[in-house]
Image (spheres, helix red, strand yellow):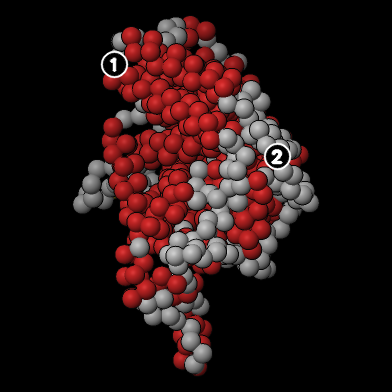
Amino acid sequence: MEGAGGADGGGKMRRRACLCSKDDFFPEESFRTWGNYWGALKETPARLQDRLLSRSLETTELHEVKARSQHEMKRTLTWWDLIWFGIGAVIGAGIFVLTGLQTKEHAGPAIVLSFVVSGVSAMLSVFCYTEFAVEIPVAGGSFAYLRVELGDFMAFIAAGNIILEYVIGGAAVARSWTSYFATLLNHKPEDFLVKAHGLADGYNELDPIAVCICGIVCIFAVLSTKGSSRLNYVASIVHILVIVFIIVAGLTKANTANYTPFTPFNSRGIFKASAVLFFAYVGFDAVSTMAEETKNPARDIPIGLIGSMVMTIIAYCSMVITLCLMQPYSQIDKHAPFSVAFKAVGMDWAKYIVAFGALEGMTTALLTGAVGLARYVTHIARTHMMPPWFAKVNEKTGTPVNATIVMLSATAVIAFFTKMDILADLLSISTLFIFMLVAVALLVRRYYVSGVTKRANRNKLAICLLLIVGSSIATATYWGLSEHGWVGYVFTVPIWFLATVALRVLVPQARDPKLWGVPLVPWLPSASIAINIFLLGSINRASFERFGLWTGFLLLYYYFFGLHASYDTAKESGEIRGKDGLEWKKIEEGNESSITNAGPGNEASPIPST
């Protein structure tokens, strides 16, 4: 591991030839030589303890970490842009593809209740994201929020799942794009897939069109954020018009007899469908990553996030009500439910409008997802948990070109091989896990400030959080293992309720939001934790096994690379050497100085002691 880019002419020639050097990927002291790396590995236990206990400062995320991208992202977005980004990011493959399978096999006409449950869970998460995005307006989104409140290690685990969420989500949308494109051209949804008999089942239907659409989206994503916003704005308007057409035209063929029976698969089917259909709401968190490019985060982000989610929930529920009124649930097509439903009621011409609208929605979902993921990766790389090469912002375009190209390339590869059902379940796990962590982080933010919160209150907070999370896990586990039992809920639900009451009554809040805050704290964040974990209990075992493999890979990467890179970066950013020469004072640990009004132009405002 010798350093690259020396002063000699040969080093300069090598740099020109490959456009980057080892220092672009591993510039930290631990990776300068093999001897340094071996020494770093021997210090792993001490370094791991340091990173587990360290929390980043808001000011660090807002200024020092952001400066590592070399160039500023351009503040060009308003609340109007964010609303359309939110609509474009969310309304995509989920409603047009997954609805058919879940309605036919799991929920029946009660699919509308599945969308309501998923929508409530998503809206609770929206509230949590909004407060963080207003207070800490950086491109890192939930990664930055968790790094400030739960520390480096939890932020890294979340970071890996954020990347998984967006890459898997983009791949699912790209494959769905191919299916509806085939429908638009009067083909069956699977006609454009290439069968590879030598590959394992689930990975043997190759999709070259998905790769092409990822490449086209990549071009738009790297050119300009404002340009992407304008394209998304126009495409989303067309998409909304198509949704209105589906609802109005579909209701002219409504038959209320199709709503009987309403719940053919009982409540278990409703919640199972809800867990998978949560995929339909994925993408709103991409709006929070745009905070760094928003003109007035305190005003624009709440309007953008909450406004887009309200519109999305209303659109989804209206569409599935219409679908189930048009056709008996047992006859709904799994792959292209809306197109086939119009054909079944004698409106064959309408399937072209539906397919066109679906393609519009999926294209905007791909674009906004690519924009959001690139900004997540940029901020993660700023902390050196990923190679800092990903953090570079292009001076001309003001966009993170490296992160955008690499992440969309990964999306294209997965879309090329992997079937939709595998992608949907895996996506829901990673997303629900991250949203649960953000809700926990919000409670920590409100009730704990290092140096301000008394030890007794800190301990009470820890106990309440353990009871809230533990009872939620117990409820979800009981739901997953017991199909007809109810005794377990008599214990788990009251424990969750009493733990939330105790947090509200016994632990004083250590911090009030400066610009915008989640209402009804701790009830809304606690409910978000419970619902997200409960929905996890409805996902199949195979998906959890894949999730476990991914988590294992993340831990290995962190042990051998991410831990040492982030430790060196934190040390070089200003930590003070301890008396014994071995320990370092953690300036990243939260204290009163971290309590800032994070909007542009706002100054720090200390919180009085409790």
Q: Which mark is residue 607?
A: 2
Pick out the residue farthest to the left: 198
Q: Quadrant of the C terminus?
A: top right
Q: Nearer the viewer, residue 175 or 21?
A: 21
x then y, percent, for residue 558: 38, 56
Q: Left or right? Give the position of 520 relative to 210.
A: right
Figure quadrant of residue 493? top left
Pick out the residue farthest to the front: 579
Q: Nearer the viewer, mark 2 or mark 1?
A: 2
Q: Nearer the viewer, residue 470 or 190?
A: 470
Q: Is residue 144 visible?
A: no
x then y, percent, for residue 245: 63, 27
Q: Which mark is residue 107?
A: none
x then y, percent, for residue 497: 49, 16
Q: Secondary structure at mark 2?
A: loop
Q: Left or right? Give the position of 177 relative to 248.
A: left
Q: Quadrant of the N terminus?
A: bottom left
* Above or below 289: residue 70: below
Classed neighbour count for the residue bearing mark 1: other residues with Cα under 10 Å, few (<14), some (14–19), many (≥20): few
Which residue is painted at 51% across and 90% down in the image? Answer: 7
Q: Nearer the viewer, residue 277 or 364?
A: 277
Figure quadrant of residue 65? bottom right
Figure quadrant of residue 91? top right
Which residue is painted at 30% across and 14% down in the image? Answer: 483
**Amino acid at dot 2:** Ile
The residue that mark 1 highlights is 482
Which residue is painted at 23% across and 50% down in the image? Answer: 199
Mark 2 or mark 1: whose residue is earlier in sequence: 1
**Amino acid at dot 1:** Ser
